[in-house]
Amino acid sequence: MADRKAVKIVSGQPDFLQFNNLACETAGGKVIFATDEWFAPASNLLKKEPPEFIASAFTEYGKWMDGWETRRKRIPGHDWCIIQLGVPGIIHGLDVDTSFFTGNYSPFASVQAACLDEAPALTLEGDRTGMAASESQFEAVAKLHSESWEELVPVTELKPGFSDTCHNYFPITYPTRVTHLRLNMYPDGGIARLKVYGVGQKDWSALPTQDQLDLVALVNGGVCLGYSDAHFGHPRNMIGLGRSANMGDGWETARRLDRPKNLQVDGKGILQVPGYEWAVLRLGHPGVISQIEIDTNHFKGNFPDSCKIEACYLTPEEEGKYVSGRWSSDPGNKWRVLLQPQKLQAHHRHFYSCDPLALSGPVSHVRLVIAPDGGVSRLRLWGRPSSTRHTSKL
């Protein structure tokens, strides 16, 4: 079958964009404090959907904006907010997105981080448009001493929210688990989205080794490390929370152009096609996989005809070589079949366990292969974590 090389990130975009957005609202991220939310609430920062602009949309407080926008400050200080990550973990990069904030974007920003043992008793509920933090909220947040948190991004000038300048990317080198962020705007203004790219970090020592867990789940530290195509949806969506909300909340490829003009099937009803698509994911912890779920929820006219899963155990050094080579070769012949080719159905949860699973030893990485193309909404790999811990260099 014809393989396809790994997708290269568009020139000018940082490599950290491949990782998970640990602060996204769909991953459980939330804003727990904001100094001011006059024009638009800070909760918009964590929306999964791209920002939008509606020229005719106004509220009683002013122009409606799809982001966080504070009033023009007329008192001492600057505006800031506290974000609780949905998935605590190691942060590799940030995107401070100012989309559509052109004459009202925040001219400068900084970001600080902390790992808190307990979640603070701070919440923001309902539509906060037109509101500001109360005296009691300021007193409660002061107990966090967030002004002294570790600085991830120093005070930095932001670019306006035009399409060619809106993404303010910041690579992060901070090898410490983070649970909360403080986003500072200087002195005021608007930011559309804050995306926090990284890898979840779970405390595996507190879990009994016999417990069955989804080893590839976002919340358990799973991460996508490479893929052949993601035209309509990134493979990292497959390890998200719950079932998918729609087709956009899954992995979907473009239609392959090498499909035969007239399709034929083998004795098992599987299409005979020359090409396929693939995605490589690292488990949150190496383990022995005992059950697989492949969910094509919402993919009704565009589900893959078939799939298979390969697996291997890689050291951090071996992983680094594969990543640098964009998974284009298998020099050590590491990959072994975990799940033999299976015919898939539309809009359906497929479960495989016991006999179909070909490997019994611990694995650290899996490669989902779909043929010829299409979409998968969720991938679940249930199993027991092994005693070996994989510490990636990424």
Image (cartoon, rainbow, N blue to C red):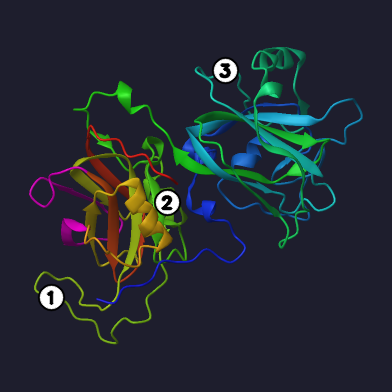
Residue found 29% across the figure and 58% down from its top: 368
Quadrant housing residue 71: top right
As helix, strand or loop, the secondary structure at mark 2 comes to helix
- Mark 1: which amino acid? Asp
Residue found 35% across the figure and 50% down from its top: 317
Q: Nearer the viewer, mark 2 or mark 1?
A: 2
Within 10 Å of the Cα at label 1, are there few (<14), some (14-19), or many (20+) other Cα atoms?
few
Residue 100 appearing in the image: yes
Within 10 Å of the Cα at label 2, are there few (<14), some (14-19), or many (20+) other Cα atoms?
many
- Label for residue 236? 2
As helix, strand or loop, the secondary structure at mark 3 comes to loop
The residue carrying mark 3 is 120
Q: CA distance from mark 3 to mark 2?
A: 29 Å
Residue found 83% across the figure and 47% down from its top: 104
Magenta residue span: 335-362
Q: CA distance from mark 2 to mark 1?
A: 31 Å
- Mark 3: which amino acid? Pro
Q: Earlier in the sequence, mark 2 or mark 1?
A: 2
Q: Nearer the viewer, mark 1 or mark 3?
A: 3
Q: As rendered, which of 239 and 267 lies closer to the eye?
A: 239
Pinpoint residue 90: horizontal percent, then vertical percent: 49, 37
The residue carrying mark 1 is 266
